Amino acid sequence: MKKVLVTVIAIAAFILSATAADNVANKTVSVQGKARIITPITLANTGSQALDFGVIARGTTDATIVVGANASPSPSVATGDAVIISSAPQTAAKFTVGGETGKTYAITIPSTTQTIISGANTLNINVFTCSNGATGTIGTNDIFYVGGTLAVPAAAVAASYTGTFNVTVNYN
């Protein structure tokens, strides 16, 4: 009889410990799901204002022309003997950012040389700069300018050159 009682107690203890382990291993907890939808970020080339180096008379040596990243750039000949014709307007590209007020964003401008063309002839733009640096805040600095440096070889063919480059903004 003692053996039966000890066996029953052992089985009961085993069942109770297995039930307790199951209760610990199978807990359910409810958790809240959340989301906040914000206004999509937008970027516009304001007034289609391009990065325009204006009219340049090439020189006898290779030259570089710089247009700063601001509302009224004063283009300059950084190297060489090219001449900028001042009667033609020079502009930095102008952009407007929209989206959720107070949100910060990152600005990506070209980090590699971009080519502008006229038929089979090319010129290169590099050293792009941005008036806001690499970031901005919507509602604070929604407008920014992009400038750059144009390489004008002494052998550049007289022509009108055009091309495109990409500027990107993303929420941080």
Image: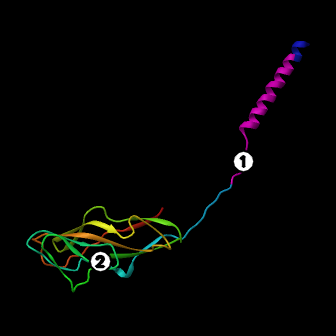
Residue found farthest to the top: 2
Q: Is residue 124 magenta?
A: no
Pinpoint residue 60: horizontal percent, then vertical percent: 8, 72
The three-letter amino acid code for the residue at tag 1 is Val
Residue type at tag 2: Pro
Tell me which label, 1 or 2, sits earlier in the chain. Answer: 1
Q: Nearer the viewer, residue 120 or 88?
A: 88
Residue 45 location, quadrant:
bottom left
Judging by the rendered image, the residue that carries numbered circle 1 is 29
**Residue shown at 26% from the left, 83% from the top:** 89
Residue receiving disc 2: 73
The local secondary structure at tag 1 comes to: loop
User: The magenta stretch spans which residues?
Assistant: 6-31
Count of picture labels: 2
Tell me if 12 is positioned left or right of 71 in this view.
right
In front here: 24 or 8? 24
Report the quarter where the N terminus lies. top right
Tag nearer the camera, 1 or 2: 2
